[in-house]
Image (cartoon, rainbow, N blue to C red):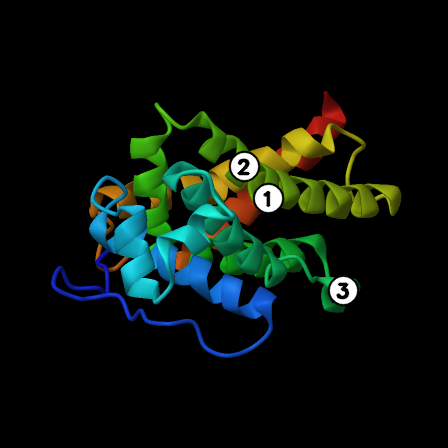
């Protein structure tokens, strides 16, 4: 999947805007993450971040012991912001499970295939060997919450008799893998077909997944 960012593009950085301390820190984390993703973790020093964000290195070290801690905090902030937009499905309470899964699928797939999220995955893969805390931190604020949300949805429909009683967390993980794994892999390597139809992919995954769940009634 082609990225909208060109190789020469520069991150829009600068001194954090006015606001509460929490808002200023959130903006700082967003700017730091932009540097990590555009210039690479190895080439992004604390001094570089401080200069670009208009703060002192002392200010950064007062909160973070090293660059790895800042990287983890910036990633967690990004995932937390994304999660807030993905976990409010109260308006879908009266819809069929297929409709709910399609809605969730659209949100998840759109987020996973965003250029900055693809950059995030590339960095996570390259850093995980020496920074396992990054994987654990992001998993706790991202996938695990998605799985739990889906598991709760499945339980709701099972309690209404529309799904068999099963391991809802395992079902949630399976749905996410069916939905995301292939498209994300192609996006990471830039081999997504130009005519790929996301909506058709989502519809196929939902149909396959629900047929598999209902088929478990006979086992």
Find the distance from the CA under tag 1 to the CA under tag 2. 7 Å
Circle 1 residues within 10 Å: few <14, some 14–19, many ≥20: some
- Look at mark 1 in the image and give the residue it sits on: 141
Q: Which residue: 87% across, 43% down?
A: 159
Residues marked 1 and 2 touching at CB (< 8 Å):
yes
Q: Nearer the viewer, mark 3 or mark 2?
A: 2
- Look at mark 2 in the image and give the residue it sits on: 137
Is residue 112 visible to the viewer in this orientation of the structure? no
Percent position (x, y) of residue 133?
A: 49, 30
Residue 121 appears left or right of 190? right
| Residue 67: quarter of image | top left
Circle 3 residues within 10 Å: few <14, some 14–19, many ≥20: few
Nearer the observer, 83 or 171? 83
Find the distance from the CA under tag 3 to the CA under tag 2. 27 Å
Circle 2 residues within 10 Å: few <14, some 14–19, many ≥20: some
Dot 1 falls on a residue whose secondary structure is: helix
Nearer the observer, 50 or 218? 50
Q: Quadrant of the N terminus?
A: bottom left
Dot 2 falls on a residue whose secondary structure is: helix
Percent position (x, y) of residue 66?
A: 40, 38
Find the distance from the CA under tag 1 to the CA under tag 3. 21 Å
Percent position (x, y) of residue 201?
A: 42, 52
- Look at mark 3 in the image and give the residue it sits on: 90
Residue 31 appears left or right of 219? left
Q: Which label's residue is closer to the chain start, 1 or 3? A: 3
Percent position (x, y) of residue 86?
A: 60, 59
Farthest-out residue, front: 58
Q: Which residue: 49% across, 37% down?
A: 177
Dot 3 falls on a residue whose secondary structure is: helix
Q: Which residue: 22% across, 42% down?
A: 189
Residue 59 appears left or right of 160? left
């Amino acid at each position: 999947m082609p990225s909208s960012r060109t190789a020469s593009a520069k991150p829009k950085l600068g001194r954090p805007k006015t606001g509460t301390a929490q808002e200023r820190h959130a903006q700082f984390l967003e700017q730091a993450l932009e540097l990590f993703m555009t210039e690479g973790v190895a080439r992004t020093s604390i001094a570089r971040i401080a200069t670009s964000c208009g703060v002192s290195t002392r200010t950064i070290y007062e909160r973070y012991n090293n660059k790895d801690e800042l990287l983890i905090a910036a990633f967690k902030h990004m995932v937390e912001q994304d999660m807030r937009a993905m976990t409010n499905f109260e308006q879908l309470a009266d819809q069929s499970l297929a409709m709910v899964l399609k809605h969730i699928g659209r949100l998840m797939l759109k987020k996973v295939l965003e250029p900055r999220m693809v950059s995030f995955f590339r960095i996570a893969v390259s850093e995980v060997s020496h920074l396992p805390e990054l994987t654990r931190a992001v998993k706790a604020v991202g996938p695990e919450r998605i799985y739990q949300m889906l598991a709760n949805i499945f339980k709701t429909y099972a309690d209404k008799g529309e799904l068999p009683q099963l391991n809802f967390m395992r079902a949630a993980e399976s749905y996410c893998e069916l939905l995301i794994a292939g498209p994300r892999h192609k996006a990471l390597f830039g081999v997504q077909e130009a005519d790929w139809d996301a909506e058709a992919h989502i519809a196929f995954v939902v149909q396959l997944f629900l047929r598999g769940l209902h088929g478990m009634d006979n086992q």
